[in-house]
Image (tube, grey):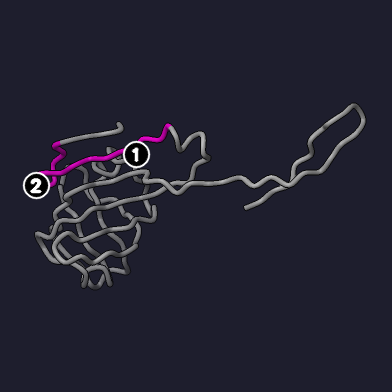
Amino acid sequence: MPFKSILVTAPRRAVEKEQIVMQFHLLKSKIHRAAVTDGNLNYEGSLTIPRDLMESAGLETYERILCSNMANGNRFETYVIPGKRGSGEIILNGAAAHLGKKGDLLTIMSFTVASRSKAKKWKPRVIVLGKGNRIINRRGI
């Protein structure tokens, strides 16, 4: 969004100049190969992720996420709610429960906005999960 700034070009003289600040939408966090362990159609919505995995990936409670289901190609947006630490449970809640089934592998992503200078140095936090939704690889952490 453009904003105005004042540039001083000479003593006691100010010139108004419009500047455009570019912002970049970047991957902030990713949990790769999260296996769905359950679904709950009767819950209001969201994706339940164990608190330890949330912390490792840098996700916050109620943070907006984009999920892609590697089994069927579905992509959907929802938000994170914390599950029991160490449980390995990845639960599709509400309408999202229609978009996957037990055993499907998800890629769970969140994004951030950064300036050009920060974007050039940016590294997302990525965890890769294996059997039982245990971390087998970490990047950017």
User: Distance between the Cα atoms at labels 1 and 2?
Assistant: 23 Å
**Quarter the C terminus occupies:** top left
Residue farthest toward the top in the current orientation of the protein: 11
Q: Which residue in the structure is indicated by mark 1?
A: 124
Residue 108 is situated, as x and y percent measured from the top left of the image, at 27, 52
Q: Earlier in the sequence, mark 1 or mark 2?
A: 1
Q: Nearer the viewer, residue 36 or 70?
A: 70
Q: Residue at x 29, y 50 (%)?
A: 82
Residue 49 is situated, as x and y percent measured from the top left of the image, at 24, 51
Residue 96 marker: none
Residue 57 is situated, as x and y percent measured from the top left of the image, at 29, 41
Placement of 124 over or under 3, stated as above or below: above
User: In the structure shown, which secondary structural element does the residue marked by tag 2 occupy?
Assistant: helix
Q: Residue at x 31, y 38 (%)?
A: 125
Residue 133 covered by magenta stretch = yes
Q: Which residues are magenta?
A: 121-136
Q: Which amino acid lies under the numbered mark 1 shown in the image of this protein?
A: Pro
Placement of 92 over or under 16, stated as above or below: below
Q: Which residue in the structure is indicated by mark 2?
A: 132
**Residue 12 image-quadrant placement:** top right
User: In the structure shown, which secondary structural element does the residue marked by tag 1 occupy?
Assistant: loop
Q: Nearer the viewer, residue 90 or 138?
A: 138
Residue 83 covered by magenta stretch = no
Q: Is residue 130 left or right of residue 74?
A: left
Residue 79 is situated, as x and y percent measured from the top left of the image, at 35, 58
